[in-house]
Image: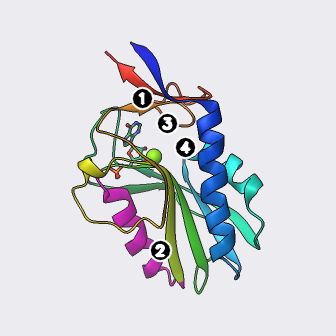
Amino acid sequence: MSVSVLVDKEKISDIVKNVSDKINNDYNEEYILLGVLSGSVLFFSDLAKNLTGDLKFDFIKLSSYGDEKTSSGNVKVIRDLVMDVNNKNILVVEDIVDTGYTVNFLVEYLKNKGAKSVKFVTLLSKPSRREVTVDVDYTGLEIEDKFVVGYGLDYAEKYRNLPYIGILND
Ligand code: IMP
Ligand code: MG
């Protein structure tokens, strides 16, 4: 399999800067920056360095994929977050919003734990793939229906280390 570059390092920095400016403008209360493992880690760390607000870090690991390229729609918590989110503002950091099942699941999950507000920032979004309607507050870049890897995104746990986002060709 080969990877062709879709979004290079420079473009990723521009996206991160753009999105973090908006977040810094919007948040004037304390919030928890909640990274969805493992795909969001590189975006999370670049984003966090540009955030100026009063925030804490936590992480959650979910699964719906297995080693396939399409979501099963059956989202499960594999590693739970550690902080008590009751009455807290949560900003969830996602690598990509595809079918929308993950975002949908997290809104319910965090609201059930008493979160005061739940917002989402995603590096990438594939709007044409939505199976459920979801509200994403900050989107770095919308892309077409291609399977992408790199900058945290994987195929069967590989390619996460690439410093750019690329299309995975068979
Ligand atoms: P959703 O629940 O279908 O919206 O999928 C969200 C998750 O699917 C993301 O957090 C990714 O882990 C994974 N995903 C969706 N599309 C891609 C892709 O093109 N490359 C790698 N992972 C993807
Ligand atoms: Mg993911």
- Residue 151 image point, x, y percent: 57, 34
**What label sits on residue 134 in the rendered view?**
none
Secondary structure, mark 1, is loop
Label 3 and label 1: CA atoms lie apart by 7 Å
The residue that mark 4 highlights is 38
Upstream in sequence: badge 3 or badge 4: 4
Near mark 3 (Cα within 10 A), the count class, few <14, some 14-19 or many ≥20, is: many
Q: Which residue is drawn at 75% across and 71% down?
A: 53
* Quarter of the view holding residue 22: bottom right
Q: In this view, does 116 lie above or below 144?
A: below
Q: Where is residue 44 in the image (x, y as percent from the top left)?
A: 64, 50
Label for residue 153? 3
Identity of the residue drawn at 30% across and 33% down:
68
Q: How far apart are marks 3 and 2 (CA)?
A: 24 Å
Q: What span is colored magenta in the figure?
A: 99-116
Three-letter code, disc 3: Leu
How many residues crowd around disc 1 within 10 Å: few (fewer than 14), some, or many (20 or more)?
some
